[in-house]
Image (cartoon, grey):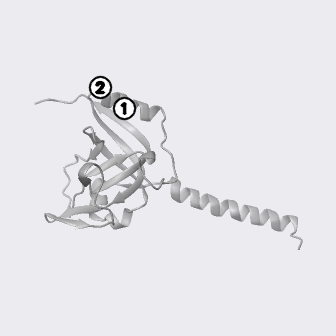
Amino acid sequence: MKISWSCSVLLLGLCAVIGQGHADEQGAPIKVTLCDLAEHPEQYAGKMVAVRASEMGKDFWIEDFTNKPCSAYTPVIVVYPDQIKPAPGFDLVRDDTFNKFFEEVRKGRYVEATYEGRFDVAYVWRDHKRIGVGSDKGYGKKHRYGARVVLRRISDVVSRPRYVL
């Protein structure tokens, strides 16, 4: 069966559009807050998100200090793609912003950034009760984190000195 040249071009164009749409789905994360993730975890589970937060502690967990009321909470740890099985299908971008982030953290500065990656959730806290959302027990040591962001990229890094009172 012969396919005409114009039909071939049309099919290739259609495939490119469909492929680009799929790439955009994976490439454009949903902008959320940590509160959004805790209040509606099922809505974001398994999806690419971009969340603005502060780096906290040596476990690489993140927190939001906006002091806005939130009806739910879950501690979130950040992990690299090569730390999980099965592999997430994307790699960590280790660019200048990534390097700047860790340089500032090593200096002991307060560092805020946008964390982009896949959101996985096991549980959230609501009304002082632990509510299971996913099939996992939790993440990190002793499963103490209810959610994780499998990191693809760090952006918008801002740092300032830590103030000791």
Residue 91, position as x, y percentages in the image = 51, 46
Q: Secondary structure at mark 1?
A: helix
2 or 1: tag closer to the N-terminus: 1
> How many labels sit on residues?
2
Residue identifier under label 1: 102
Residue 77, position as x, y percentages in the image = 31, 48
Residue 59, position as x, y percentages in the image = 28, 41
Instruction: Name the residue located 87 percent from the left edge and 64 percent from the top edge.
Output: 5
What crowding class fits label 1: few (fewer than 14 Cα within 10 Å), some (14-19), or many (20 or more)? some
Query: Which quadrant would the N terminus be assigned to in this image?
Result: bottom right
Q: Is residue 23 left or right of residue 145?
A: right
Q: Is residue 21 left or right of residue 62?
A: right
Q: Secondary structure at mark 2?
A: loop
- Which sits in the foreground, 159 or 26? 26
Q: Is residue 138 above or below residue 57?
A: below
Residue 64, position as x, y percentages in the image = 25, 47
Residue identifier under label 2: 107
Q: CA distance from mark 2 to mark 1?
A: 9 Å
Q: Residue furthest bottom?
A: 1
What crowding class fits label 2: few (fewer than 14 Cα within 10 Å), some (14-19), or many (20 or more)? few
Q: Is residue 82 left or right of residue 103?
A: right
Q: Is residue 31 above or below residue 7?
A: above
Q: What amino acid does circle 2 point to? A: Lys
Q: Is residue 16 left or right of residue 75?
A: right
Q: Residue furthest left?
A: 165
Query: Which quadrant would the C terminus be assigned to in this image?
Result: top left
Q: Residue furthest top?
A: 107
Instruction: Name the residue located 20 percent from the left edge and 53 percent from the top edge.
Output: 68
Q: What amino acid does circle 1 point to? A: Phe
